[in-house]
Image: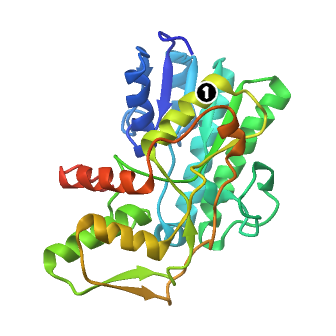
Amino acid sequence: MEKNAKIYVAGHGGMVGSAIVRRLREAGYTNVIGRTHSELDLTRQADVENFFAAEKPEYVFLAAARVGGIRANATYPVEFAAQNAYIGLNVITSAHNSGVRKLLYLSSACCYPNSAQIPVEESALLCGAPEKTNEAYAMAKNLCLRLCEYYKREYDDDFIAVMPANCYGEGDCFDPLYSHVIPALLMKYHEAKQNGAEQIEVWGTGKAMREFIYVDDLADACIYVMGNYSGAEHLNIGTGEEISILGLAQLVGRTVGYRGRIVCDTTKPDGKMRNLLDSSKLLSMGWRPKYSIEDGIRRLYAHFLRGGANKY
């Protein structure tokens, strides 16, 4: 990408989108644009088409999405399916119609089949059903990921997609219903420490294993891929390391300074038991993550203490 090229980051106000904007500007890109939801509703096809026709961005990072944890996905499947499908279809189609030079679409590792062999290779996509609590979100995201591939195949558009591991960091959501596991645990532990609570409840058995990537690492990877990859198949973006939910809870507890007990509520779902990505293709291209899980959680908790917690 040229430093003066017009770059549109869809979802620039969210955790991943804002990190991409921040890292682009730090790297010297001078014409990065975004629109808030009130300025542009990406689920409205005509509005998206008009935006692309007027602004004519040359490059697009599609980071906008309706996201949430297990509880939100299970409670609002219609919203997670429909809104993510509309966002992806509208932006990708408008990018094609307006002649965008390159587009990068961000999906999520939770879209892989529940039965996929660990570590999960890119070829495992659509080889089985996604985890049930996450099905609505996964179906919509997989449709849009494949749409990028179809545009490349039929029209030779340089539309690519990436499949990140679970992401966390500055700009994360700390809402009790919508937050993912790391901000949810940070919020729980912080409140428990403040209130002198003797124990913390964690959903599931605590045995489920997760791979996490800090948001600045993900943003850097996306920018790297945008400049160095044009293949038809999507790329995994992960760290190659995993941690159990119980181990994560213990790590968060140490970070916050909470010394109470952890109680696993086995009546609640674990979600997918393992979801470690095989990111060897990206790693072989020369990209490497910079932040360990310990470093990332410390940074996020410091951000939280500075009043940086988003509640959507």
Residue 156 visible, this orientation: yes
Task: Please name the residue shown 66% across and 55% down the image.
Answer: 277
Residue 280 placed where, x, y %? 70, 44
* Pointer 1 local density, CA inside 10 Å: few below 14, some 14–19, many at least 20: many
| Number of on-image labels | 1
Task: Check the image and report above or below for 65 versus 149.
Answer: below
Residue 102 placed where, x, y %? 64, 23
If the image is split into quadrants, where does the N terminus sit? top right
Q: Secondary structure at mark 1?
A: helix
Q: Is residue 173 left or right of residue 239?
A: left
| Residue under pointer 1 | 226
Task: Check the image and report above or below for 93 versus 132.
Answer: above
Viewer-closest of 286 and 135 = 286
If the image is split into quadrants, where does the C terminus sit? bottom left
Task: Please name the residue shown 37% across and 39% down the image.
Answer: 13
Residue 34 visible, this orientation: no
Residue 244 placed where, x, y %? 52, 72
Q: Residue furthest right?
A: 154
Viewer-closest of 268 and 281 = 281
Q: Amino acid at mark 1?
A: Met
Q: Is residue 93 left or right of residue 35?
A: right
Residue 206 placed where, x, y %? 49, 80
Task: Please name the residue shown 62% across and 55% down the image.
Answer: 109
In the picture, residue 177 is in which quadrant? bottom left
Q: Residue furthest left?
A: 195
Task: Check the image and report above or below for 260 versus 273.
Answer: below
Q: Is residue 297 left or right of residue 280?
A: left
